[in-house]
Amino acid sequence: MLKRLLPSFLILFLLTSCASPSPTIDSATPTLSTPEPDSTDWWRTAIFYEIFVRSFYDSDADGIGDFNGITQKLDYLQSLGITALWLMPIHPSPSYHGYDVINYYAVNTEYGTMADFKNLLHEAHKRDMRIIIDLVINHTSSEHPWFKDANANIDSPYRDFYIWSNETGVGNWHQGQNGYYYGYFWGGMPDLNYRNPNVTTAMLNITNYWLNEIGIDGFRIDAVKHLIEEDGKVENTPATHEWLKDFYIAYKAQKPQTYAIGEVFGAGSSIVKQYTGSELDHIFNFEMSAGFVNSPNGGSNSSINSAIKFAYQDMPDFNFATFLTNHDQNRVMSVFNGNIHKAKLASFLMLTSAGTPYLYYGEEIGMQGEKPDEDIRLPMQWSADEFAGFSTVQAWRGPYTDARNPQFDYTQVNVELQTGDSTSLLEHYRTLIQLRKLNPTLQTGDTILLATDNSGIYAVLRKDTNGTFLILANLKDEAISDYAIDLNEANLVESTISVETVFGENQAQSPQRSAGVFNPYKPFESLSSYAMYILKINQ
């Protein structure tokens, strides 16, 4: 079992430089307790936006997006309602994606200078917008100076920063210059050895640098379930959980309002529960994501209802991150084959649900893209101009085009065309985000799943001391009149008197009671195909 050495690390990250290979452990340091979660944690009400810097906006005409490009588009993001940014890896790296880091203390020069990044951070903070960055701690690049030295010299002070064997093991072992090294993902990403306390010290130096010297607001921790292998297991091991408990204490000590979210690919609520509270602030809930996407795609409430039920069981406070798709998955509009009605429904489900929502850049306009990975990370489509308004020169990768379906090309799908068009996906997102921000109940209120007597109808109640809202949607491509909502499990007071349509086309009927119970409730005699409503219930 991993030893609890964090108190020593907290002292060492202040005393040692990033290059110090062999720090000394001071066992006399007093123990720090795990901080209690704060009910005012800013991330509980945030709207996040994930950006691949290379593809967002090119400010200097080299075909590559950059920090200054993001700075120039902050007003757009603010008008969308975004309150926090997640930047995919910004460190120097031999790859286009950046998930194999060469230097944790620098920024990728293709994206600009550290001064450019600090200016972006300053301008974002002026707009009350937070920034978190990807922190890749499971592994480094094989070109990182630590690994290059460790690989060349068995007496290197960095040798034990990595995991070595004299014989090739089963899977994920790679030939080095002096033995075999472990790299879960591939040979260019050698895993760090967190059984060596000096590795943890080095990482805490890095987190302290970015939090307190640079001033960012937190981290997205990549591949967090793979940190420490144990007894043949390569994910979600007890040793990983023990390390994260100490890591949580450390980053909260460095900067109390730091936010750290972990990527545990495929995690549902039961796995989210294991990592949340005393290890990380949030985990992405892939179960909820599947519900948001699969229910509109299949025209049935079974997927989203199941995800909510699993959340009831394991994460009843819904304290997790939600999303539709991310940079590792086919874009959600491609999953829907370009169907804007399904895209609107999916965003409606996410933005009216509990949890902290994350948008993937371009999702709000319906950008498409299918694997390979480069094609789900294409340049942002700002306009119909040449190079999609992303740059004035040929981009690192061309914008999306579809010869068979030209209506999906960037010339037809872009920010400029959709801005101000009330029927567009962009304005749909903008409206829902503003409603969410204006009504705290939609952010953190309780969620009560309601029976509807029809699998094509989705209904939940969002409820707290600020108000009560009925979220209602027809998931099918045809009108539905055969449905009835059961409000008797909704804990509504008898003084319910009226219903107000906050989002949707028509005014709803109010619920009625007979003999002290609610009658089966039909706010509308018929719900048109893909209809979406937010109804405020006045009590």
Image (cartoon, rainbow, N blue to C red):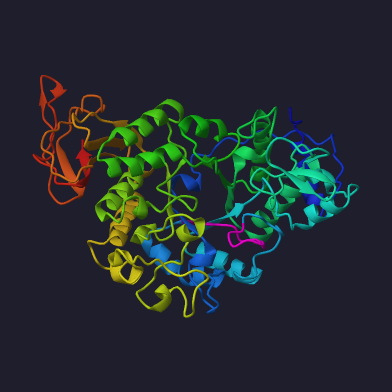
Which residue occupies the extreme top position in the image?
Answer: 515
Q: Position of residue 93 (x, y in %)?
A: 66, 61
Please give left or right for residue 191 compared with residue 375 in the image. right
- Where 349 falls versus 395 (above or below)? above
Please give left or right for residue 116 compared with residue 399 in the image. right
Residue 86 belongs to magenta span: yes
Magenta segment: 84-98
- Where 413 falls versus 171 (above or below)? below
Residue at position x 64%, y 49% from top? 255
Q: Quadrant of residue 145?
A: bottom right
Q: Quadrant of residue 101?
A: bottom right
- Where 453 falls versus 70 (above or below)? above
Residue at position x 61%, y 71% from top? 112
Number of marks in the image? 0
Q: Nearer the viewer, residue 276 or 124?
A: 276
Residue 209 belongs to magenta span: no
Q: Quadrant of residue 62?
A: bottom right
Q: Position of residue 243 (x, y in %)?
A: 69, 35
Give the main secondary structure of the magenta stretch. loop
Please give left or right for residue 39 compared with residue 105 in the image. left
Q: Position of residue 58 (x, y in %)?
A: 51, 73
Which residue occupies the extreme right position in the image?
Answer: 155
Image quarter where the N terminus lies is top right
Q: Position of residue 490 (x, y in %)?
A: 25, 28
Residue at position x 40%, y 66% from top? 400
Q: Does residue 236 show up?
A: yes
Q: Does residue 444 show up?
A: no
Image quarter where the C terminus lies is top left
Q: Nearer the viewer, residue 309 or 64?
A: 64
